[in-house]
Amino acid sequence: QIHLVESGGGLVQPGGSLRLSCAASGIIVSSNSMGWYRQAPGKERELVATMSRRGTEVYVDPVKGRFTISRDNAKNTVYLQMNSLKPEDTAVYYCKAVTASLDNYWGQGTQVTVSS
């Protein structure tokens, strides 16, 4: 079975930082496309960042220069380093894996709240 478990969310003040983790089991993160998505209250889930199997990183414009996606192959974990956080970054953040056969797997999400 494939499981993705996110952690690292919490309450942070504007301008602060958080690092989210996505621990994978049942798949190898370096062999699949991995991504971070977020869903704010009353809004649809949206893409934040992705990393391809080859390590190519893609970011949406609102987070460019502030967020960084990375992976630790030894720990089979994907990370999202979030700096200069803004209130509009408040959302539930989800990890997603897309396999070579285009099957999608999601984690349960972790809440990020940016507020003073």
Image (spheres, rainbow, N blue to C red):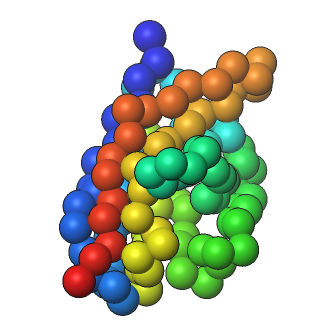
- Quadrant for the C terminus, please: bottom left
Q: Is residue 11 above or below residue 42?
A: below
Q: Position of residue 100 (x, y in %)?
A: 76, 25
Q: Residue furthest front?
A: 42
Q: Is residue 88 above or below residue 41?
A: below
Count of all numbered marks drawn on residues in the image: 0
- Quadrant for the N terminus, please: top left
Q: Say whether residue 10 is visible.
A: yes
Q: Say whether residue 35 is visible.
A: no
When asked about the image quadrant of residue 24, the answer is top left
Q: Position of residue 105 (x, y in %)?
A: 56, 25
Q: Residue furthest top?
A: 1
Residue 51 in the figure: left or right of residue 70: right
When asked about the image quadrant of residue 11, the answer is bottom left
Viewer-proximal residue among 8 and 15: 15
Viewer-proximal residue among 64 and 56: 64
Q: Position of residue 58 (x, y in %)?
A: 73, 62
Residue displayed at 69% across by 20% down = 103
Q: Position of residue 88 (x, y in %)?
A: 48, 72
Residue 91 in the figure: left or right of residue 70: left
Residue displayed at 42% across by 56% down = 91
Residue displayed at 69% across by 66% down = 59
Residue displayed at 34% across by 85% down = 14
